[in-house]
Image (cartoon, rainbow, N blue to C red):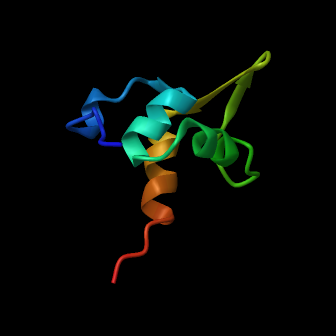
Amino acid sequence: MRSTFKTNEELPATLSATDISKYLGISKANSYQLMNRSDFPTLKLGKRKLVPKDKFLIWVNNNTNVI
């Protein structure tokens, strides 16, 4: 799966599981697994889970292994 976002500025202010899967190139099921992790910056609104863009990008940066 290829990202449909060309730049980080194109990301919405809050990301859904679909947005995360497109950005990371993973399945939607894997996005939901990430969103259920205690260290992942998920915002719960009723039954809906969203991820603030700024916190998501920080999480990605902190969890990327750079050699």
Quadrant placement of the N terminus: top left
Residue at the image point whose x is 62% and y is 40% from the top? 29
Q: Is residue 58 visible?
A: yes
User: Residue 64 is drawn in which quadrant?
Assistant: bottom left
Up the image or down, 9 lies above or below 59; here it is: above
Q: Position of residue 24 (x, y in %)?
A: 41, 47
Of residues 14 and 27, the one nearer the viewer is: 27
Q: Is residue 53 visible?
A: no
Q: Residue furthest top?
A: 46
Q: Residue furthest left?
A: 6
Residue at the image point whose x is 26% and y is 32% from the top? 9
Q: Position of residue 58 (x, y in %)?
A: 47, 52
User: Residue 46 is drawn in which quadrant?
Assistant: top right
Q: For this view, does 20 lie left or right of residue 66? A: right
Up the image or down, 20 lies above or below 58; here it is: above
User: Residue 22 is drawn in which quadrant?
Assistant: top left
Of residues 22 and 1, the one nearer the viewer is: 1
**Total marks drawn?**
0
Q: Position of residue 60 (x, y in %)?
A: 46, 55
Q: For this view, does 8 lie left or right of residue 51? A: left
Q: Residue furthest bottom?
A: 67
Residue at the image point whose x is 56% and y is 31% from the top? 17
Residue at the image point whose x is 30% and y is 42% from the top? 2
Quadrant placement of the C terminus: bottom left
Of residues 27 and 46, the one nearer the viewer is: 27
